[in-house]
């Protein structure tokens, strides 16, 4: 499997966003992860289309947008127009999941689904073949810097089995508490794409941290 490192700008310094994204690019990051929170689905409020536009101007890397919002379909058109390459929505707020995934693709973006720590993987069985990305939350979403929930490892294994059974080579992403002490276990469980915020931006050498996280997976292969 290919290892993808997706730094989350939730932990970046917004006074130096251009510098921080340039650092991620120079460090070899694969995607830039943008967390969109509405203050309803999760207890925090973050970015909108303007920030996605800014990130798009600053890099040619894929912009990986995670919609932690109710009624995510309201944002599809504007976010894809702003430059999102991937849109990931939550199963918990998407009663018409197949329709919503189809709409994202119609707009020209890749479509992903995320599940919270308390949501079973089997709830995605019926759309397992329709995903470009499956995101396992390893913390309860809403804030950066939380501790990894160990039970997420079994969910990653189940998610990998679900995708394999569907014959789907979609990315299997993990988000929350990803750092040097957790990334290897996630990789061995079957994840291939890793969202890291504090682990990168709060590191003594953020540029080197991207490579260090990648090596921990490569060495465990």
Image (cartoon, rainbow, N blue to C red):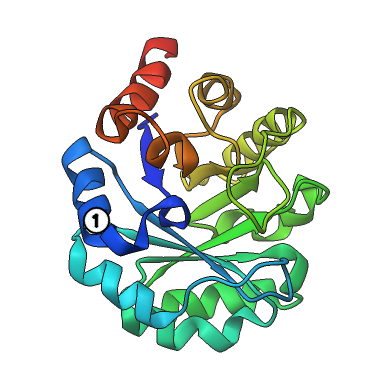
Asked whether residue 107 appears in the rendered view, the answer is no
Residue at the image point whose x is 30% and y is 77% from the top = 53
Residue 112, placed above or below residue 174: below
Outermost residue toward the front in this view: 15
Residue at figure coordinates x 60%, y 72% from the top left: 45
- Which residue is at the front of the view, 213 or 164? 213
In the rendered image, which quarter contains the N terminus? Answer: top left
Residue 58 seen in the current view? yes
Residue 162: image quadrant is top right
- Secondary structure beneath label 1: loop
Q: Which residue is mark 1?
A: 61
| Number of marks in the rendered image | 1
1 and 33: which one is in front?
33
Indicate the position of residue 83 as horizontal and vertical percent values: 31, 75
Q: Position of residue 79 (x, y in %)?
A: 42, 80
Residue 100 in the image: state x and y as whole percent.
60, 78
Q: Nearer the viewer, residue 193 or 6?
A: 6
Report the residue at 42% width, 37% height from top: 202
Quadrant of residue 177 in the image? top right
In the picture, the quarter occupied by the C terminus is top left
Q: Residues within 10 Å of mark 1 (few under 14, many from 20)?
A: some
Residue found 35% across the figure and 66% down from its top: 85
Instruction: Please tell me whether residue 8 is drawn above or below residue 189 in the rendered image.
Output: below
Query: Please, is residue 183 above or below residue 27 in the view?
Result: above
Q: Position of residue 48 (x, y in %)?
A: 46, 79
Q: In the shown orientation, is residue 108 left or right of residue 175? A: left
Residue farthest along the top direction in this orientation:
219
């Amino acid at each position: 499997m290919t290892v993808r490192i997706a730094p989350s700008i939730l932990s970046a310094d917004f006074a130096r966003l251009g510098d921080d994204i340039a650092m991620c690019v120079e460090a070899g990051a694969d995607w830039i992860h943008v967390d969109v929170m509405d203050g309803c689905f999760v207890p925090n409020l973050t970015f909108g289309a303007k920030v996605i536009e800014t990130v798009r101007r600053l890099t040619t890397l894929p912009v990986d947008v995670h919609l932690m919002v109710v009624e995510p379909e309201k944002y599809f058109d504007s976010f894809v127009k702003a430059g999102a390459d991937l849109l990931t929505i939550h199963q918990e707020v998407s009663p018409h999941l197949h329709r919503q995934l189809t709409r994202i693709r119609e707009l020209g973006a890749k479509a992903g689904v995320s599940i919270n720590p308390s949501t079973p993987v089997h709830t995605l069985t019926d759309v397992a073949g329709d995903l470009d990305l499956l995101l396992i939350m390893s913390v309860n979403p809403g804030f950066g810097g939380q501790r990894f929930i160990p039970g997420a490892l079994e969910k990653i294994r189940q998610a990998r089995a679900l995708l394999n059974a569907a014959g789907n080579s979609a990315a299997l992403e993990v988000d929350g508490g990803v750092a040097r002490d957790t990334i290897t276990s996630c990789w061995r469980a079957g994840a291939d794409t890793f969202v890291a915020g504090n682990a990168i931006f709060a590191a003594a050498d953020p540029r080197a941290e991207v490579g260090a996280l990648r090596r921990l997976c490569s060495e465990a292969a």
